Image (tube, rainbow, N blue to C red):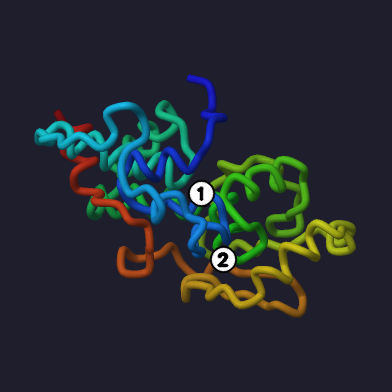
Amino acid sequence: MARYTGAVCKLCRREGKKLFLKGDRCYTGKCALERRAYAPGQHGQSRKKNSEYGMQLRAKQQARRYYGIQEGQFYKYFEMANKKSGVTGENLLQICESRLDNVVYTLGWASSRAEARQLVTHAHYRVNGNKVDIPSYLLKAGDVVSIKDKSRDSDKIKMVLESNASRPVPTWLDLNRETLEAKVLALPTREQIAAPVEEQLIVELYSK
Protein backbone atom coordinates (compact mmCIF):
# COMPACT_ATOMS: atom_id res chain seq x y z
CA MET A 1 0.00 0.00 0.00
CA ALA A 2 1.46 3.37 -1.03
CA ARG A 3 1.96 6.09 1.57
CA TYR A 4 -0.84 8.66 1.72
CA THR A 5 0.19 11.91 0.01
CA GLY A 6 -3.08 13.86 0.14
CA ALA A 7 -4.17 16.65 2.48
CA VAL A 8 -3.46 15.37 5.99
CA CYS A 9 -6.06 17.66 7.58
CA LYS A 10 -8.69 15.47 5.93
CA LEU A 11 -7.42 12.55 8.01
CA CYS A 12 -8.08 14.42 11.26
CA ARG A 13 -11.53 15.41 10.06
CA ARG A 14 -12.29 11.83 9.07
CA GLU A 15 -11.31 10.55 12.50
CA GLY A 16 -13.08 13.38 14.32
CA LYS A 17 -10.08 14.24 16.49
CA LYS A 18 -6.73 16.01 16.24
CA LEU A 19 -3.92 13.71 15.19
CA PHE A 20 -1.37 16.57 15.15
CA LEU A 21 -0.16 15.83 11.64
CA LYS A 22 0.78 19.40 10.68
CA GLY A 23 2.89 20.48 13.63
CA ASP A 24 2.27 23.97 15.03
CA ARG A 25 -0.74 24.59 12.77
CA CYS A 26 -2.71 22.02 14.78
CA TYR A 27 -2.50 24.26 17.86
CA THR A 28 -3.91 27.35 16.11
CA GLY A 29 -7.31 28.48 14.87
CA LYS A 30 -6.23 27.47 11.37
CA CYS A 31 -6.70 23.82 12.28
CA ALA A 32 -9.15 22.34 9.76
CA LEU A 33 -10.90 20.30 12.45
CA GLU A 34 -11.81 23.45 14.38
CA ARG A 35 -13.20 25.15 11.28
CA ARG A 36 -14.98 22.09 9.86
CA ALA A 37 -15.58 19.55 12.58
CA TYR A 38 -17.09 16.92 10.33
CA ALA A 39 -15.82 14.25 7.94
CA PRO A 40 -14.71 15.35 4.46
CA GLY A 41 -16.68 14.55 1.35
CA GLN A 42 -20.21 14.96 0.05
CA HIS A 43 -21.77 13.01 2.92
CA GLY A 44 -19.42 14.22 5.64
CA GLN A 45 -22.14 16.02 7.61
CA SER A 46 -24.67 13.19 7.51
CA ARG A 47 -25.29 11.32 10.74
CA LYS A 48 -23.81 7.83 10.86
CA LYS A 49 -24.40 4.99 13.29
CA ASN A 50 -21.15 3.25 14.10
CA SER A 51 -21.10 -0.52 14.55
CA GLU A 52 -18.76 -2.32 16.95
CA TYR A 53 -16.53 -3.22 14.03
CA GLY A 54 -16.66 0.38 12.80
CA MET A 55 -15.42 1.70 16.15
CA GLN A 56 -12.60 -0.85 16.20
CA LEU A 57 -11.59 0.05 12.65
CA ARG A 58 -11.60 3.76 13.43
CA ALA A 59 -9.39 3.17 16.50
CA LYS A 60 -6.88 1.28 14.37
CA GLN A 61 -6.90 3.92 11.64
CA GLN A 62 -6.45 6.70 14.20
CA ALA A 63 -3.37 4.99 15.65
CA ARG A 64 -1.89 4.31 12.20
CA ARG A 65 -2.40 7.87 11.05
CA TYR A 66 -1.21 9.39 14.32
CA TYR A 67 2.14 7.60 14.06
CA GLY A 68 2.30 7.58 10.25
CA ILE A 69 2.58 3.80 9.97
CA GLN A 70 1.33 1.73 7.06
CA GLU A 71 -1.05 -1.20 7.52
CA GLY A 72 1.41 -4.06 7.02
CA GLN A 73 3.96 -2.68 9.44
CA PHE A 74 1.32 -1.78 12.01
CA TYR A 75 0.04 -5.37 11.99
CA LYS A 76 3.61 -6.63 12.47
CA TYR A 77 3.88 -4.37 15.52
CA PHE A 78 0.66 -5.90 16.86
CA GLU A 79 2.11 -9.40 16.46
CA MET A 80 5.26 -8.29 18.27
CA ALA A 81 3.16 -6.77 21.05
CA ASN A 82 1.03 -9.89 21.36
CA LYS A 83 4.08 -12.09 21.88
CA LYS A 84 5.50 -9.89 24.64
CA SER A 85 4.48 -10.28 28.25
CA GLY A 86 2.13 -7.66 29.65
CA VAL A 87 -0.88 -5.87 28.20
CA THR A 88 -0.95 -6.20 24.41
CA GLY A 89 -2.46 -2.77 23.76
CA GLU A 90 0.11 -1.00 25.91
CA ASN A 91 2.91 -3.04 24.32
CA LEU A 92 1.69 -1.93 20.89
CA LEU A 93 1.80 1.75 21.82
CA GLN A 94 5.24 1.31 23.41
CA ILE A 95 6.56 -0.08 20.14
CA CYS A 96 5.08 2.81 18.15
CA GLU A 97 6.46 5.35 20.63
CA SER A 98 9.95 3.86 20.46
CA ARG A 99 10.28 4.39 16.71
CA LEU A 100 13.15 6.75 15.92
CA ASP A 101 10.97 9.16 13.92
CA ASN A 102 8.50 9.41 16.82
CA VAL A 103 11.26 10.03 19.36
CA VAL A 104 12.80 12.73 17.15
CA TYR A 105 9.41 14.45 16.96
CA THR A 106 8.75 14.03 20.70
CA LEU A 107 12.10 15.65 21.52
CA GLY A 108 11.12 18.72 19.48
CA TRP A 109 13.73 18.01 16.81
CA ALA A 110 11.04 18.01 14.12
CA SER A 111 7.76 19.90 13.80
CA SER A 112 5.72 16.83 12.80
CA ARG A 113 6.21 13.10 12.51
CA ALA A 114 6.20 13.39 8.73
CA GLU A 115 9.05 15.91 8.94
CA ALA A 116 10.83 13.65 11.44
CA ARG A 117 10.67 10.75 8.98
CA GLN A 118 12.18 12.92 6.27
CA LEU A 119 14.98 14.23 8.50
CA VAL A 120 15.82 10.73 9.75
CA THR A 121 15.94 9.45 6.17
CA HIS A 122 18.39 12.26 5.36
CA ALA A 123 20.65 10.98 8.17
CA HIS A 124 20.57 14.05 10.43
CA TYR A 125 20.55 11.93 13.61
CA ARG A 126 22.75 9.39 15.36
CA VAL A 127 21.90 6.52 17.70
CA ASN A 128 24.68 5.62 20.14
CA GLY A 129 27.02 7.56 17.86
CA ASN A 130 26.14 5.54 14.77
CA LYS A 131 24.35 6.68 11.63
CA VAL A 132 20.73 5.52 11.48
CA ASP A 133 18.56 6.60 8.56
CA ILE A 134 15.61 4.24 9.11
CA PRO A 135 12.56 6.03 10.58
CA SER A 136 11.11 2.75 11.89
CA TYR A 137 14.27 1.89 13.87
CA LEU A 138 13.11 0.81 17.34
CA LEU A 139 14.97 2.35 20.25
CA LYS A 140 15.42 0.62 23.58
CA ALA A 141 16.18 1.75 27.11
CA GLY A 142 19.72 3.13 27.37
CA ASP A 143 19.98 4.27 23.74
CA VAL A 144 21.31 7.79 23.16
CA VAL A 145 19.97 9.84 20.25
CA SER A 146 21.83 12.92 19.03
CA ILE A 147 21.85 15.38 16.16
CA LYS A 148 24.77 14.90 13.77
CA ASP A 149 27.49 17.52 14.30
CA LYS A 150 27.34 18.75 10.72
CA SER A 151 23.55 19.02 10.84
CA ARG A 152 23.63 21.32 13.87
CA ASP A 153 24.78 24.14 11.60
CA SER A 154 21.92 23.56 9.16
CA ASP A 155 19.47 26.47 8.92
CA LYS A 156 16.62 23.96 8.76
CA ILE A 157 17.64 22.21 11.98
CA LYS A 158 18.26 25.52 13.75
CA MET A 159 14.81 26.78 12.77
CA VAL A 160 13.13 23.57 13.96
CA LEU A 161 14.96 23.62 17.29
CA GLU A 162 14.10 27.26 17.88
CA SER A 163 10.40 26.86 17.05
CA ASN A 164 10.06 23.80 19.32
CA ALA A 165 12.29 24.95 22.18
CA SER A 166 9.38 25.16 24.62
CA ARG A 167 7.83 21.79 23.76
CA PRO A 168 7.63 19.62 26.90
CA VAL A 169 9.54 16.36 26.81
CA PRO A 170 8.07 13.24 28.49
CA THR A 171 9.83 11.85 31.53
CA TRP A 172 10.88 8.61 29.79
CA LEU A 173 13.32 10.70 27.72
CA ASP A 174 16.23 12.67 29.20
CA LEU A 175 17.01 15.59 26.88
CA ASN A 176 20.12 17.75 27.16
CA ARG A 177 19.29 20.87 25.16
CA GLU A 178 22.89 22.10 25.35
CA THR A 179 24.57 19.03 23.85
CA LEU A 180 21.51 18.10 21.72
CA GLU A 181 21.59 14.57 23.04
CA ALA A 182 18.77 12.54 24.58
CA LYS A 183 18.77 9.24 26.42
CA VAL A 184 15.91 6.75 26.46
CA LEU A 185 15.52 6.09 30.18
CA ALA A 186 12.84 3.44 29.74
CA LEU A 187 10.01 2.53 27.43
CA PRO A 188 6.95 4.64 28.29
CA THR A 189 4.04 3.45 30.40
CA ARG A 190 0.49 4.02 29.16
CA GLU A 191 0.19 7.07 31.43
CA GLN A 192 3.20 8.63 29.69
CA ILE A 193 1.78 8.15 26.19
CA ALA A 194 -0.33 11.03 24.88
CA ALA A 195 -1.67 9.21 21.81
CA PRO A 196 -5.45 9.80 21.46
CA VAL A 197 -6.03 6.10 20.85
CA GLU A 198 -8.27 3.41 22.38
CA GLU A 199 -5.79 0.58 22.04
CA GLN A 200 -8.14 -2.07 23.45
CA LEU A 201 -10.39 -1.64 20.40
CA ILE A 202 -7.37 -2.34 18.17
CA VAL A 203 -6.62 -5.53 20.09
CA GLU A 204 -10.23 -6.62 19.70
CA LEU A 205 -10.12 -5.93 15.96
CA TYR A 206 -6.94 -7.92 15.30
CA SER A 207 -7.96 -10.74 17.66
CA LYS A 208 -11.01 -11.73 15.61
- Horizontal arrangement in the rendering, residue 148 relative to residue 88 (left or right): right
- Horizontal arrangement in the rendering, residue 159 relative to residue 46 (left or right): right
* Badge 2 or badge 1: first in the primary sequence: 1
Q: Nearer the viewer, residue 131 or 66?
A: 66
Badge 1 marks a residue whose secondary structure is loop
Residue 29 on image: x %, y %: 48, 62
**Residue drawn at point x = 40 percent, y = 35 percent:** 74
**Position of 148 relative to 42 (above/below):** below
**Residue drawn at point x = 29 percent, y = 54 percent:** 90
Residue type at mark 1?
Answer: Leu
Q: Nearer the viewer, residue 204 or 22?
A: 22
The residue positioned farthest toward the top in the image shown = 1
Residue type at mark 2?
Answer: Gly
**Residue drawn at point x = 24 percent, y = 41 percent:** 202
Q: Nearer the viewer, residue 62 or 93?
A: 62
Q: CA distance from mark 2 to mark 1?
A: 28 Å
**Residue drawn at point x = 24 percent, y = 55 percent:** 86
Q: Quadrant of the C terminus?
A: top left
Mark 1 — residue? Answer: 21
- Quarter holding residue 166: bottom right
Residue 77 on image: x %, y %: 39, 38
Is the residue marked by circle 2 packed among few (<14), some (14-19), or many (20+) residues within 10 Å? some
- Mark 2 or 1, which is nearer the eye? 1
Of the numbered discs in the image, which one, if any, rests on residue 142?
Answer: 2
**Position of 43 relative to 34 (above/below):** above
- Horizontal arrangement in the rendering, residue 114 relative to residue 159 (left or right): left
